[in-house]
Image (cartoon, grey):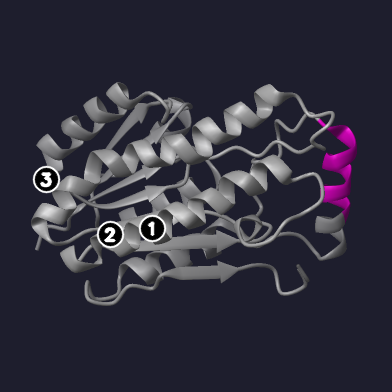
């Protein structure tokens, strides 16, 4: 039986890339979305459309979805993974970094949900998987803006879950701790970045993106009448 379409944002590296590899291995056609088209195309996955996209651009997002759904059918799963991390204290961090984080981590996530959710409710089937963070459940030094975006992801996820539960649509929040990804590469605060790296080294490094993708897959492969609302995973040695 032909498997349904899975859409993944932030699919050019890290958790998004690992999820793309896992869901493709399981036989799903994919729409991969990110700013680095070459990285997605280099995966060379079958039955996959790769499109360069800024998730804050609603019209471009809609165009890419329509193209994929014309080819592979309706979106059954949206993995909203696109996100950025900028560290710093509130009195010195550039406010533009807060704006970027909220635009991508929150509004970009909501753009994707807005575009696929009506169809899921109408079909009475579908899964939204929102990639949040342990930083969406507790605060960390130098993370005030980032934690704000991830607390928002948790709140949005739970609010929408309650709205669509009667329509048999699932909403899942994945909250990883420290993961080995490129998310820190553009952090501009040298002191905060060094503190983060020192702690990661102290605990023996982060978990792999592949392990996180396995958690995502586990939630999706449950029967449609089973919603694993939240998964929190982190390195065993990460205390907070």
Q: Give the quarter of the figure containing the C terminus.
A: bottom right
Could you tell me which secondary element the residue under label 2 belongs to? helix
Which residue does the numbered mark 3 point to in the structure image? 73
Q: Residues within 10 Å of mark 1 (few under 14, many from 20)?
A: few
Magenta residue check for 193: yes
**Mark toward the viewer: 3 or 1:** 1
State how far apart marks 2 and 1 are (Cα). 7 Å
Left or right: residue 9 versus residue 164 is right
Q: Give the quarter of the figure containing the N terminus.
A: bottom left
Seen at 51% across and 31% down, the residue is 103
The image quarter in which residue 185 lies: top right
Marks 2/1 in contact by CB < 8 Å: the verdict is yes
Left or right: residue 198 versus residue 51 is right
Could you tell me which secondary element the residue under label 3 belongs to? loop
The disc at residue 159 is 1
Q: Residues within 10 Å of mark 2 (few under 14, many from 20)?
A: few
The image quarter in which residue 207 lies: bottom right
Seen at 30% across and 70% down, the residue is 221
Which residue does the numbered mark 2 point to in the structure image? 163
Seen at 38% across and 34% down, the residue is 33
Left or right: residue 174 versus residue 125 is right
Magenta stretch, residue numbers: 189-198
Out of 110 and 21, give the one closest to the viewer: 110
- The vertical placement of 215 against 223, above or below, is above
Where is residue 210 shown, x and y percent of the image?
52, 59
State how far apart marks 3 and 1 are (Cα). 27 Å
- The vertical placement of 118 against 185, above or below, is below
Where is residue 209 shown, x and y percent of the image?
56, 56
Out of 70 and 152, give the one closest to the viewer: 152
Where is residue 159 shown, x and y percent of the image?
38, 58
Q: Earlier in the sequence, mark 3 or mark 2?
A: 3
């Amino acid at each position: 039986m032909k498997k349904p379409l899975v859409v993944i944002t932030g699919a050019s590296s890290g958790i998004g890339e690992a999820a793309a590899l896992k869901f493709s291995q399981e036989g799903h056609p994919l729409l991969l979305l990110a700013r680095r088209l070459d990285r997605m195309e280099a995966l060379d996955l079958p039955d996959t459309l790769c499109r360069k996209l800024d998730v804050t651009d609603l019209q471009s997002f809609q165009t890419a979805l329509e193209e994929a759904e014309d080819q592979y059918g309706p979106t059954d799963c949206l993995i909203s993974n696109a996100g950025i991390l900028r560290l710093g204290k509130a009195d010195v961090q550039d406010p533009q970094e807060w704006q970027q984080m909220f635009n991508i981590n929150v509004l970009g996530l909501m753009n994707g949900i807005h575009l696929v959710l009506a169809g899921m409710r109408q079909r009475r089937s579908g899964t939204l998987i929102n990639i949040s963070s342990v930083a969406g459940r507790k605060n960390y030094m130098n993370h005030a803006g980032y934690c704000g975006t991830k607390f928002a992801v948790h709140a949005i996820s739970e609010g929408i879950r309650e709205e669509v539960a009667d329509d048999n649509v699932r909403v899942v929040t994945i909250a990883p701790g420290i993961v080995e990804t490129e998310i820190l590469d553009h952090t501009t605060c040298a002191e905060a970045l060094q503190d983060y790296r020192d702690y990661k080294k102290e605990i023996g490094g982060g978990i792999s993106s592949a392990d996180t993708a396995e958690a995502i897959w586990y939630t999706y492969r449950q029967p449609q009448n089973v919603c694993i609302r939240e998964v929190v995973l982190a390195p065993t040695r990460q205390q907070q």
